[in-house]
Amino acid sequence: MRAGLAVAALLLLLCAGGLVAAGALRRPRALPSAAPEVVCLWTSGAPVINPACDRSTQWSSRVPVEILELRDIFGDILVLPAPSLARLRDTLPPRVRVLIYSTNLHSLDFALAVERRVRPRVSVVLSDEHRRRPDHLALAAPCVMRQYADRGWEWPAHVRQLPIFTHCWDGLAPGSLADAARGYAERSLDWCFAGTPKGDRGELCAAMGRAFPSHFAGQTEPEENAQLYSTSRLALNPRGNSSLECSRAYAAMRLGCVPVGKAATWEVQEAFGRLRPRSPLLDLYADSTEGMVELAHRLLDPPFWSMVSASVRAWDAECLAELRSAVERA
């Protein structure tokens, strides 16, 4: 029943304009920035991007390559070591348009003190994958964007959810999206899963494998993932380390590979319900293993798959455009 409702919702989304013109599938250019108006706070040390992929965490004390994803949204970013507010006083610009920080590195009190000093129009809250820091919803900027959501939180009207997008371990280097528009017949695998078989992943992989023998399931190196997703029609998308929202889904979507998974309705709504524009991921989960396999059968109908594949690729560009528009409005 849940799988049938999901397919019906997807059809409504597609008919209502989920598909956009081919030109909209290209990722929009970042917001122009004539001055260092976007500031990202770090801890200490030289503000340089660490070229190695840190697989232990999405946001650590070393500047990771994930900042490239932020630059794609917000434009040029000035990364400042911020071990203390006193150390920041000589380096902070007098006004900041966008303030970015991680809850793994700085407390709410520290962020509020910086807000009072630079009066940003937008504050961006990163990390909190385990959703243990709801106090960071209390920022005072006119517009607040924060990663991850929890159904027990009271979200102020000026706070919106920021997708986690992709991680360096997803391996989507420049040029890796060249095959994103591959059609159904150009993809040799019905489904794939890149990851370890922890939790219920083994059960889900086994059920999908019995139904659809043409697949890959196992661990990969980052440089292998773009080819895997661009040659697969579906991507099994179970829970990540702690949250249903996982970078695996966003990587697959960018390459036209349709995510599918198993989760309770409330979990799906919690993870993706606050994303704007409406996320197609809301319709790509079933609440049982059998329902997930049934949904996968429906998604693998070639004409329907082609529509959904184009829709998930389009959503990425639409979401980035909406985030930039929110910054401009603020």
Image (spheres, rainbow, N blue to C red):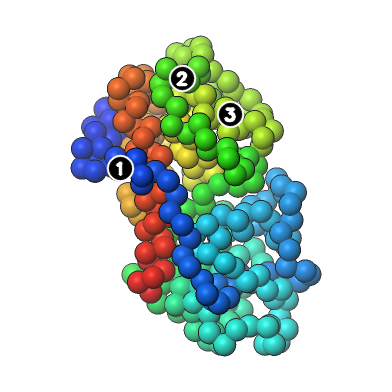
Asked whether the residues under the numbered discs 1 and 3 touch, taking CB atoms below 8 Å apart as contact, a structural biologist would say no
Residue that label 3 marks: 227
Rendered position, 157 above or below 225:
below
Residue at the spot 67% in from the left edge and 35% down from the top edge: 223
Between discs 2 and 1, the one toward the N terminus: 1
For the point 45% across and 49% down, the residue is 27
- If you read the primary sequence from the N terminus, does the residue marked by circle 1 or circle 3 appear first? 1
Please name the amino acid that badge 2 sits on. Answer: Glu
Look at the image and tell me whether residue 293 can be seen: no
Residue type (three-letter) at the residue carrying disc 3: Gln
- Which of pointers 1 and 3 indicates the residue nearer the eye? 1
Q: Kindly tell me whether residue 322 is visible in this rendering.
A: yes
For label 1, the SS is: loop
| Marking on residue 21 | 1
Q: Quadrant of residue 20?
A: top left
Q: CA distance from mark 1 to mark 3?
A: 25 Å
Cα separation between marks 2 and 1: 22 Å
Mark 1 surroundings within 10 Å by alpha-carbon count, few (fewer than 14), some (14 through 19), many (20 or more): few
Is 308 above or below relative to 267?
Answer: above
Q: CA distance from mark 3 to mark 2?
A: 12 Å
For the residue labelled by badge 2, is the local secondary structure a helix, a strand or a loop? loop
Q: Nearer the viewer, residue 55 or 181?
A: 181
Crowdedness near tag 3: few (<14), some (14–19) or many (≥20) residues, C-alpha within 10 Å: some
Q: Give the amino acid type for the residue marked by disc 1 in the picture.
A: Ala
